[in-house]
Image: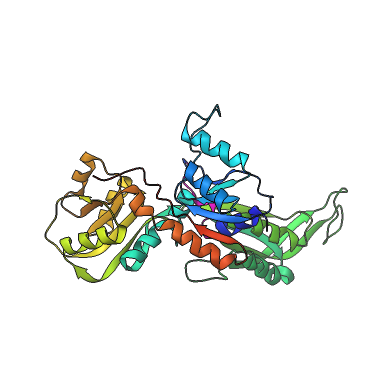
């Protein structure tokens, strides 16, 4: 197996097309075509992680956080980032980062937080917009059904819990082939009228390449008429943060104790307690201050995230509790998710969960 085949599995879990614009995800170091020897999964890529990969004969590190984030002009080993990359290259180790692609995945970072807390009735807190596309094309009536089926097979036409979704209408198309054309229908130099079916079908943007391939391979026309639009509709299956409910309400102190135990955090920084039971819980792994208002609008009783600043705690506005559990702590189960997923997909290679604690923050 080549490393690029592992990347295909990771892309199926969390397509890099859905990562945030500021992020740096994908294969950061290494050749995707080299043969795989083993996979080490980690939250961060440090020198001790590269050493761990060497010790375990793993030539692919799958890291949640990208070790390369900003541009680097020199590689002389003066920073930990440079030393990591230099050691990885020297030992033919590839590094793949998944970061906000997995943050935005339906079964990603925030899904794992909900799993650990036992939340039910979950949904995305901030659904992404602009990642649903609509294809409109035209085909002879006799070919429309086959073409539609091929587009479905390529991944088009799924909306929420429904698949094979499309809209069709019939009309008459006209065209005239020039002397340089090779028409499958009609004659050169003559205007042709053809009974056609217009097919409209939506799809997630990361499947566009396969869908266009299916369109061109299964359409009889030399020149295929089609158009693609980007829709503003929110995609309820892709986005950041998640909100769910506890099976039974809990008191504020009881739930804060549960959070501390589940996420093994040294402390929880939180806003004023409101004297109300906790039922609806919003989560966002990592730095989530930007989603405070979203958690309020969703009716959350508590919002669990990390990296809140002093004045941001005021934004609770006595409408919910803000709980900062620590950046590492909120994302720690992500590597377990990746390992579990890859072990189901790849059974004949070692997939190792790093045993190194890469949390840079210590508690006294």
Q: Residue 250: horizontal and vertical position, in percent?
A: 19, 67
Q: For the view shown, which residue lies furthest in the left direction? A: 275
Q: Residue at x 47, y 54 (%)?
A: 354
Q: Nearer the viewer, residue 344 or 140?
A: 344
Q: Residue at x 14, y 51 (%)?
A: 272
Is residue 103 something one can see in this rendering? yes
Q: Quadrant of the N terminus?
A: bottom right
Is residue 12 something one can see in this rendering? no
Q: Residue at x 45, y 46 (%)?
A: 44
Does 169 appear in magenta? no
Q: Quadrant of the C terminus?
A: top left
| Quarter of the image where one finds residue 169 | bottom right
Q: Residue 5: horizontal and vertical position, in percent?
A: 64, 57
Does 16 appear in magenta? yes
- Quick check: 74 above or below 158? above
In magenta, the rendered stretch is: 12-21
Left or right: 129, with 281 as reference point: right
Q: Residue 39: horizontal and vertical position, in percent?
A: 57, 55
């Amino acid at each position: 197996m080549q490393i690029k085949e592992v990347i295909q599995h990771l892309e199926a879990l969390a397509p890099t097309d859905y990562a945030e614009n500021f992020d740096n995800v994908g294969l950061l170091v290494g050749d995707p075509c080299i043969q795989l020897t083993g996979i080490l999964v980690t939250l961060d890529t440090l020198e001790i992680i590269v050493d761990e990969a060497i010790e375990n004969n793993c030539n692919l590190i799958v890291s949640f956080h990208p070790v390369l984030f900003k541009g680097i002009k020199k590689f002389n080993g003066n920073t930990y980032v440079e030393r990591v990359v230099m050691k990885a290259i020297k030992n033919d180790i590839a590094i793949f980062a998944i970061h906000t692609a997995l943050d935005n995945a339906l079964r990603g970072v925030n899904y794992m937080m909900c799993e650990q807390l036992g939340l039910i009735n979950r949904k995305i807190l901030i659904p992404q917009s602009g990642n649903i596309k609509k294809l409109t094309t035209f085909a002879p009536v006799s070919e429309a059904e086959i073409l539609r089926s091929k587009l479905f097979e390529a991944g088009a036409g799924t909306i929420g819990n429904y698949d094979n979704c499309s809209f069709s209408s019939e009309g008459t198309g006209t065209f005239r082939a020039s002397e340089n054309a090779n028409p499958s229908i009609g004659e050169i130099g003559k205007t042709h009228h053809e009974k056609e079916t217009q097919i409209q079908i939506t799809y997630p943007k990361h499947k566009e390449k396969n869908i266009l391939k299916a369109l061109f391979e299964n359409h009889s026309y030399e020149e295929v008429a089609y158009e693609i639009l980007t829709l503003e509709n929110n995609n309820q299956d892709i986005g950041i943060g998640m909100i769910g409910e506890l099976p039974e309400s809990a008191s504020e102190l009881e739930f804060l104790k549960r959070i501390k135990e589940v996420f093994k955090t040294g402390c929880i920084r939180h806003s004023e307690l409101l004297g109300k039971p906790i039922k609806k819980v919003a989560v966002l792994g990592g730095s989530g201050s930007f989603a405070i208002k979203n958690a309020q609008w969703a009716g959350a009783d508590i919002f669990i995230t990390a990296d809140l600043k002093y004045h941001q705690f005021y934004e609770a506005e006595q409408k919910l509790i803000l709980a900062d559990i620590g950046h590492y702590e909120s994302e720690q189960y992500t590597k377990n998710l990746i390992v579990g997923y890859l072990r189901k997909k790849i059974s004949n290679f070692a997939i190792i969960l790093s045993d190194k604690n890469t949390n840079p923050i210590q508690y006294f």
